[in-house]
Amino acid sequence: MNKYFLTLVTSFLVGVTRTGFADAYNLPIQLDYSLIKKAVVSQLFTGEGGGAEVWKDKHKCSFLKLFNPRISGEGGQIKLLNDVQAQFGTAFGGQCIPVLAWDGALETFQQPTISADQSVLSLPVTKANAYDRQGRQLTIDKLQDLIRKVAEPKLAAVKVDLNQSRDDMERTITDYLPPENAGEVKKILATLKFTNAEANDDGIKVALAFDAPLKKQSPKPEAPFTTAEQQQSQALMQEWDGFLSKTINQAASETQSPELRDTLTEILLESRSAFQAGLKGQGSGNGDPVRVFFTETWQKLAPQLRTLAKELPEVEGLRYLTFIAATDVIYEIEKLGAPFGLDVSSDGLRRLTRMLMAGKQRADTK
């Protein structure tokens, strides 16, 4: 999940500041259970056939394996349900003689917990239940002891560690900023921490805290694009159009929803108009065209994308959920007052586009 979410989140915490840090901000982020499942699978379910071999003896006569994790929320905790294969056996004469075998399900309840230094989000187990294939709860002492000693610690070891993620975050962020701002990026990332985590029906609500300047920086106005720059930027705009057009067609195809296709197409047309007006410096009576487009569009689009993500298979739905999480961050930062240099505005769009065009020119000359 670090790769799919936190790197995207901190890609927007990129203040171009020159003053000392003073104010702390809390950014509420919703981690959908599909994202939590991605973390569990990537860290634990790495064995043959996508299983998790949490224990085996040296003779391979006794083992405990988990398969097919399903995650939901219940009673303010994460509920994780796994298919299980377990066996206790003994080696005799070169053969494995099973003594006890279990094929059923393991249900655990796990409480999102933040470490004392506020840098690690973990999921310790508070309760575990074992069931047979008919759904009857098992109370075999030897089995319960094995679950407590080996299965629970493995499941509780799944975590999101900010300390392990900061270097990756920094590399991602600096791709979008001038090199001279690397120092500011490091300072902001060093202050990033978890302040709260609560499980709900849809996922984990996490509060990320970070330090920001006492006073919001007011970036210098960015000059409107010249005719030459407008021509040069068309390639980037075409890439944007291509990405959105592909997303529209894929989303509509996967859901068989003409209503969603119409909504996305309308948004694509609005983005073309808003971005072109922003690059040219053409304001309107309603305010900055880029900011207006973003705030109004996200309020309209986000509920539909969340519904779409829940209807799709895991991998396809994860693409949309990751996009939603990242965009939610931008939206929340805007509500905080955008205390950063890369702002959602026409000035910010022109500034970012000029940096991207300069980077593309450097890459083409290598």
Image (spheres, helix red, strand yellow):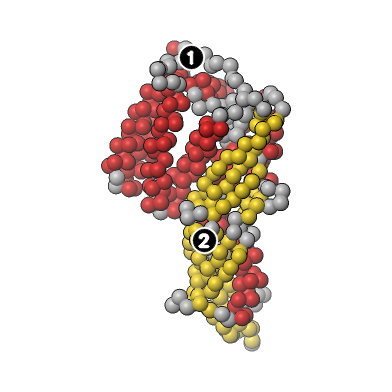
Dot 1: few (<14), some (14–19), or many (≥20) neighbours within 10 Å?
A: some
| 328, 195: nearer the viewer | 195
Q: In the figure, residue 292 lies in which quadrant? A: top left
Q: In the picture, residue 9 is in which quadrant?
A: top right
SS at circle 2: loop
Q: Is residue 25 left or right of residue 344?
A: right
Instruction: In the rendered view, tell whether residue 16 sits above or below residue 325.
Output: above
Q: Is residue 180 above or below residue 308?
A: above
N-terminal label among 1 and 2: 2
Amino acid at pointer 1:
Pro
Residue 245: give x, y in percent of width and height.
36, 35
Secondary structure type for disc 1: loop
Please state, as top left, top right, bottom left or bottom right, where the C terminus lies in the image. Answer: top right
Q: Residue at x 58, y 40 (%)?
A: 27
Q: Closer to the observer: label 1 or label 2?
A: 2
Residue assigned mark 2: 75
Q: Position of residue 75 (x, y in %)?
A: 52, 61
Q: Say whether residue 201 is left or right of residue 255.
A: right
Compared to residue 88, the image places residue 39 above or below, namely above
Three-letter amino acid code at the position of disc 2: Gly
Question: What label sits on residue 281 in the rendered view?
Answer: none
Residue furthest to the bottom: 93
| Mark 1 and mark 2 residues within 8 Å of each other at the beta carbon | no
